[in-house]
Amino acid sequence: MKPDLSLEFCGVRFPNPFVLAAAPTTDDAEMVARGLEAGWAGAVLKTTSVESETVELVYPQMGGIEWNGQKLHGMINIDLISQRHIDQVEKDVATLKKAFPQKVILASIMGSRREHWQELVGRLEAAGVDMIECSFSCPHGMPERGMGSTIGQNPELTERTARWVKEAAKRVPVVIKLTPNVTDILPMAQAVKDSGADAVAAINSVLGLIGIDLDTYSPLPSVDGMGIYGGFTGPAIKPIALHCVSKIAKNIDIPVAAVGGINSWRDAAEFLLVGARNLQLCTAPMHFGFRIIDDLLDGLSRYLETKGLTRVEDLVGLALPKLTTYEHLSRAHKVKSVIDPEACIRCDLCYIACRDGGHMAIQLDAERLPKTDDDKCVGCALCPLVCPVQAISMQRITA
């Protein structure tokens, strides 16, 4: 019998934890329908606004980082919210709920004043949406209207605006999407809790500049030679997202949806282990297509089986008790580098790294085989990180 992958989030039962995040992949009902048919548990429709809100997009919108031969290790975008206003999105909600009654349809909203936020909520509830997500977190564009991370970087504005939305929501849960572009995300999560909203989603994209064209000196992506700071996403931001999700889950009593850097079932399991109850993906389905849901579901299911767990619910938060502070880490725990000569390919990378960035504890013999000097090795664990063939392990020193 396969493990039960369904998970409850804010009182709503999801068939599995995987949801399409608000993005270009969810800006068209036909695309969303294909994602739901493929096996995604739900979708957050791309952020919409009232009809009077002008949304003017520019192109090209995206740039990427290639690392170690891997495309889109990180992606940046200068996209804004959807150009499709609430009158179109409410029709999408009704159409999708009729076609997929067992799937969860969320709608993302953004407003510039109270009446806009509350109008959006009322119209989406009437259309049949299951949950509402509020974008307090877009790192670029429209700050002059008091929108996006202008709200999410201020706890007072976060609490006030979240309260407006929650007041208007008569039927569905409200999720507030937070920005990582703050010194400490906890005051923002606490503000959401204090507002009465039901959950947080963490994180939105990280403000960044992905590169400069060395021939034209133009920031990338370049629009007629000019550029701006954009939202950085993809596998490269996973450590930031893990930090934010775990910190909220450990310190604030509020459900957390994780978004940011989830690219595989392993990533998914890690976010569940640090307390996430819902997983949103954006860059991965944009890169690999909706079909990656098969790998996500199969990998997570097999992982649960190996751990002897029958429900994904049992995985949530298991790593949180093991997150501590520096002063509580053991000083008695000692490890050293052990090199497997049979697996070593004599690339010298561990020797160079230890010589110039470690403790000069690795030497090369006459045949260029690395050997660890136990008296010099302090166990920093740099050498296994640079080894390309996993020939080095860190082993505990017994007294």
Image (spheres, rainbow, N blue to C red):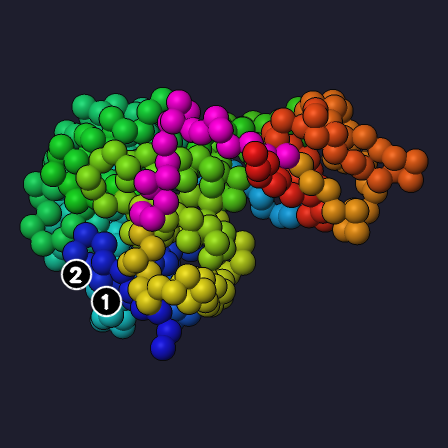
Give the amino acid type for the residue marked by disc 2 in the picture.
Answer: Gly
Q: Tell me: 273 left or right of 193.
A: right
CA–CA distance in space, label 1 to label 2: 7 Å
Residue in the image at 61% along x and 31% along y: 379
Residue 323 x/y as whole percent: 37, 36
Tag 1 residue:
97
Give me the disc on residue 127. none
Residue 148 x/y as whole percent: 31, 32
Give the amino acid type for the residue marked by disc 1 in the picture.
Answer: Lys
Residue 238 x/y as whole percent: 47, 41
Q: Element under label 1?
A: helix
Which quarter of the rendered picture does the C terminus lie within? top right
Number of other residues with Cα within 10 Å of mark 1, as a class: few under 14, some 14 to 19, many 20 or more? some
Query: Magenta stretch: residue 60 in it?
Result: no
- The residue nearer to you, when weighing 27 against 277, is 277
Q: Are marks 1 and 2 in contact (CB under 8 Å)?
A: yes
Q: Tell me: 129 left or right of 363.
A: left
